[in-house]
Image (cartoon, helix red, strand yellow):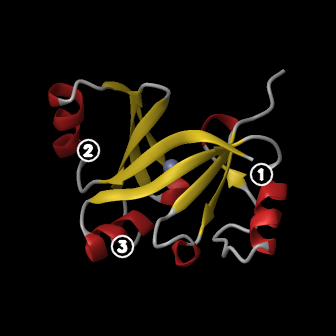
Amino acid sequence: MISSLDHLGVAVASLEEALPLYEKILGLELLGIEEVPEQQVRVAVLGLGTTRLELLEPTAEDSPVAKFLEKRGQGLHHLALRVEGDLQKTLGALADQGVRLIDRTPRSGAHGSAIAFLHPASTGSVLVELVAKPEKG
Ligand code: ZN
């Protein structure tokens, strides 16, 4: 069902302030910066071997990432696990085992992927995102 770590999400107050650490000091490659209006964030994607690091900067005061920063400060925001196969079925199987879901049905993520979040109340306070890539071909 779950195959690998797709990416890690880190909440930052400012991409401009956070990026020099990751790019210049840690030497990671910046793959791109994109705005995701539905989630009111600007995302900087950094390559990290077979996975990626995503820096999340809020673009609105009442966005989920802004609320996270207010409550908990900057830091690890979520981990995203790659799901092979049908994400809807995976969500159903998790719900059957008592896992609380934020998204009962998948929504669309970057590059044609489908994503869904699990509720931290069910996962030891860790916000977990599930990512299913589009079928090839
Ligand atoms: Zn993510």
Numbered disc total: 3
35 relative to 3 in the view: left or right = left
Q: Secondary structure at mark 3?
A: helix
Image quarter in which the C terminus is found: top right
Seen from the viewer's position, the closer of residues 65 and 59 is: 65
Q: Counting other residues with Cα less than 10 Å from the Cα at mark 3, is it few (<14), some (14-19), or many (20 or more)? A: some
128 relative to 2 in the view: left or right = left
11 relative to 63 in the view: left or right = left
Sequence-wise, the earlier of marks 1 and 2 is 2
Identify the amino acid type marked 3.
Answer: Lys
Which is more foreground, mark 1 or mark 2?
A: 1
Distance from disc 3 to disc 1, alpha carbons, whole Å, reads 27 Å
Seen from the viewer's position, the closer of residues 131 and 45 is: 131
- Report x, y in % for residue 18: 21, 44
- Residue carrying label 1: 87
- Report x, y in % for residue 8: 44, 46
- Report x, y in % for residue 65: 39, 64
Identify the amino acid type marked 2.
Answer: Leu
Identity of the residue drawn at 48% across and 33% down: 51
- Residue carrying label 2: 15
On screen, residue 78 above or below 66: above
- Residue carrying label 3: 67
- Marks 3,1: beta carbons within 8 A: no
Can residue 21 be spotted in the picture? yes
Q: Counting other residues with Cα less than 10 Å from the Cα at mark 1, is it few (<14), some (14-19), or many (20 or more)? A: many
Sequence-wise, the earlier of marks 3 and 2 is 2
Identify the amino acid type marked 1.
Answer: Leu
Label 3 CB, ligand 1: below 8 Å?
Answer: no
- Report x, y in % for residue 90: 78, 56
Q: Counting other residues with Cα less than 10 Å from the Cα at mark 2, is it few (<14), some (14-19), or many (20 or more)? A: some
Q: Secondary structure at mark 2?
A: helix
